[in-house]
Amino acid sequence: MPLTPERVEQKLRERFPGLAFERQVGEAVRDYTLIVPADSLVEICTFLRDDAELDFGMLPWMGGADYLPRVPRFETIYNLLSLSNALRFTLKVRIGDEQPRVPSVVGVWPTANWHERETYDFYGIEFTGHPDLTRILLPDEWQGWPLRKDSPLGYEEVAFTHNTPNRILPSPALKKLAPKKVKYRAQ
Amino acid sequence: MTINMGPQHPSTHGVLRVALELDGETIVACKPIIGYLHTGMEKQAEYKTYTQSIPQTDRMDYISPMSNNLAFCLAAEKILGVEPPARVQAIRVLLAELTRISSHAVWMGTHAIDIGALTVFWYTFREREKVLSIYDHVAGARMTSSYFRVGGLSRDIPEGFLDRCEKFVDEMPAHIDEYESLLTKNPIWIARTQGVALLSAKDAVAWGVTGPSLRGSGVNYDIRKAEPYSGYDTYQFDVPVGRDGDAYSRYVVRCAEMRESVKIAKQAIQRIRELGEFGPYRVRDFKYVLPPKEEVKTSMEALIHHFKIVAHGFFPPVGEAYSAVEAPKGELGFYMVSDGSPRPWRMKVRSPSFINLQALPLMVQGRMIADVIAAIGSIDIVLGEVDR
């Protein structure tokens, strides 16, 4: 019998009886998603990886998300793949606004290293136990967390004389050297 | 001694910096440093409608724009719950497979140049050019095609397009033979790639490596077979799997993959012919997808739908979805969260190059500097996709 996501959830509930698992439901939630408590994340992931039937040996990706007005504000999402069952399963952890912190899963899947650095880079979510939690895509001296919803998109203003006070205007002497304007007339 | 390879090194295929800790010429530690091409696509997508994000995806892996478009559209379609007609799916499969051939051709040419075989480049880019002309014919742009739309295609395929594709795929196997005659038994090529950049199957899975690099290590996993999309389960093709997990077996896998792509493309052309060379090229669900232009000019309802979608974008249901395709470089997926507004609340790109590059230190530890170049080439990265 092929493995179903329902069976995965059932096995998790049997293995961790005291924990509060919550299945994410919604109009268009297309993937089977389970919200798990942050404190036991590493144990849950280790169990999912090592269990012979489940065999979630691969973490194709993990990432973060910001749902600003909502409490708890942040989410980290873990997309798990079992190669032997060709099944995907999604875990989510919800984190509050103040000092967002999640245990790192680098010890479970080494591939999480760069993903967690990227999530830290974008959202400022701290991964405890991560071997090298530094910025990855943005420069090291960057201030702020760009993918947070309270961080504006931002742009660079085009430099004109009216918005750049220190702009040096070309000297009138140079104007003589400038190419002459040619008027084109319709034939 | 520590040296920096890059960011302006020609063999890094973009701007990648690799910090190498050396003992003589042996590599003690290797750290890829990325981010030089970061353009904030994930942030920008939150400020654009779904359709406006499609041209962004072309610019990620600019060698294979059609696969990126496809992955994006499939993720959006998954949220909407719409499925394009069979004819559209066949056109998508045809173009995705031509993209795979072109991407592997570029890979083979540049990888061979890195290692010192300059000739192959001229042969592979000849075929790549033909694929670009096919893009030009069908989409009007050679590289940034933006041809697919959520729920279908931007326009129908032009006249003579299928004949042109057929001619290309008929000629292609002979060209692949040509490439192989230059490399497969070439003693220098074998010396430079066999046993180099080794990655065991266990490591490949643990480090999330996908695509030909994973299959080169002997793991039979292909999303087209495991989680079929766009009707791939109805095509006859094999998944080539390598044995040794070195640069040479990745080369063998990609060569065989090009031949399989030719097979799939032939079947797709035949299927499009059966379903009609010209016909519907979008879903008829005008809440989400633009109505055909002829109807816009003749029907009031269609005009209203057209105006609403162009002016505001479409309003998907609240929810989220992740959808992945087997892009030429590996698993390319989009994770999208919709809050019911015409702009995605969150869009996350799972780009294969980013994750495959992470396994580079494993492949080069304890080896020579020259092997780093072979290793970078063999995992087939595009920095536009690594940094997004």
Image (cartoon, rainbow, N blue to C red):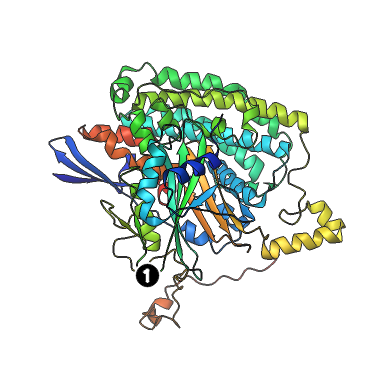
Within 10 Å of disc 1 (Cα), the crowding (few <14, some 14-19, many 20+) is few
**In the image, residue B188 above or below residue B342:** above
Q: Relative to B238, is B385 on the left or the right?
A: left
Who is closer to the viewer here, A85 or B84?
Answer: A85
Residue at 36%, 34% in the rendered image: B204
Residue B36 in sight in this render: no
SS at mark 1?
loop
- Residue B148 location (% of width, % of height): 64, 46
The kind of residue on which mark 1 rests is Glu
- Residue A34 location (% of width, % of height): 50, 50
Residue at 58%, 36% in the rendered image: B96
The quarter of the displayed image where residue B87 is located: top right
- Residue B149 location (% of width, % of height): 65, 49
Who is closer to the viewer here, B254 or B207?
Answer: B207
Subunit bearing disc 1: A
Q: How many labels were placed on the picture?
A: 1
The quarter of the displayed image where residue B214 is located: top left
The residue singled out by tag 1 in the image is A98
Residue at 33%, 48% in the rendered image: A113
Identify the image quadrant of the N terminus of chain B. Answer: top left
**In the image, residue B292 above or below residue B214:** below
- Residue B236 location (% of width, % of height): 62, 23
Q: Relative to B154, is A170 on the left or the right?
A: left
Residue B134 in sight in this render: yes
Who is closer to the viewer here, B338 or B278?
Answer: B338
